[in-house]
């Protein structure tokens, strides 16, 4: 009678040699998931339920929200947590299902790169958004901006 052993996951062997990134990834997923629930449902409530509901969402509504540092921080935190949460999930899937080291490294690098680019672009939009830029033509400005 032969006993067949199940090979441990690749990540388990790596975790014994260095910091246990799998454990910290697991903890992050649980913590960020709870925080994201609060952030997302708060976002949905303010945008979809409070006030006039969906009818209130337009350029002026977003401009008004992002004029407040509170909403900039709220949306930035939601963006960063969601992107890192999703990227960590994709990293786990790649580690579990891609067996060739070169392809795995390439995919993990692509996931990291896309996450960084999207977070940086999202943060830039959230913190540098100006609905009434100086020097813009009056025809290009929304109606709530003062005339130049």
Image: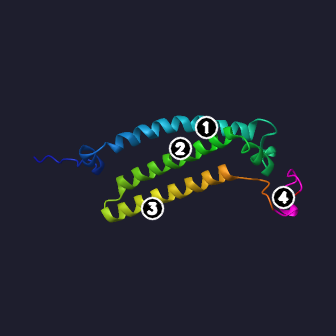
Report the residue marked by disc 2: 81
| Distance of label 2 from label 1 (alpha carbons) | 10 Å
Q: Position of residue 41 (x, y in %)?
A: 64, 37
Q: Secondary structure at mark 4?
A: loop
Residue 6 position in % (x across, y down): 22, 47
Q: On the image, which quarter does residue 125 sit in?
A: bottom right
Q: Residue at x 35, y 44 (%)?
A: 21
User: How far apart are the two marked residues, 4 and 2, measured between alpha carbons?
Assistant: 33 Å
Which label's residue is closer to the chain start, 4 or 3? 3
Earlier sequence position, callout 2 versus callout 1: 1
Q: Pointer 4 and pointer 3: residues touching (CB < 8 Å)?
A: no
Q: Secondary structure at mark 1?
A: helix
Q: Main secondary structure of the magenta part?
A: loop
Q: Nearer the viewer, residue 2 or 119?
A: 119
Q: Give me the disc on residue 110.
A: 3
Give the mark, 1 or 3, whose residue is nearer the N terminus: 1
Which residue is identified by label 1?
A: 39
Of circles 4 and 2, which is in front?
A: 4
Earlier sequence position, callout 1 versus callout 4: 1
Q: Which residue is mark 4?
A: 141
Please tell me in which quadrant of the rendered image residue 38 appears. top right
Compared across the picture, whether 2 is left or right of 134 comes to left
In whole angstroms, how far apart are the C-alphas of marks 1 and 3?
27 Å
* Secondary structure type for disc 2: helix
Callouts 2 and 1 close, C-beta under 8 Å: yes
* Residue drawn 39% across the image and 64% down it: 106
* Nearer to us in this view, 139 or 53: 139
């Amino acid at each position: 009678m032969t006993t067949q052993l199940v090979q441990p996951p690749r990540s388990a062997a790596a975790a014994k040699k260095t910091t246990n990134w799998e454990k910290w990834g697991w903890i992050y997923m649980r913590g960020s998931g709870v925080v994201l629930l609060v952030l997302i449902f708060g976002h949905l409530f303010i945008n979809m339920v409070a006030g006039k509901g969906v009818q209130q969402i337009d350029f002026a509504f977003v401009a008004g929200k992002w004029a407040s540092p509170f909403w900039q921080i709220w949306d930035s935190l939601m963006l960063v947590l969601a992107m890192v949460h999703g990227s960590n999930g994709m990293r786990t899937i790649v580690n579990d299902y891609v067996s060739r080291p070169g392809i795995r490294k390439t995919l993990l690098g692509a996931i990291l790169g896309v996450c960084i680019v999207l977070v940086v672009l999202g943060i830039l939009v959230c913190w540098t958004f100006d609905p009434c830029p100086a020097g813009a033509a009056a025809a290009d400005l929304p109606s709530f901006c003062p005339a130049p």
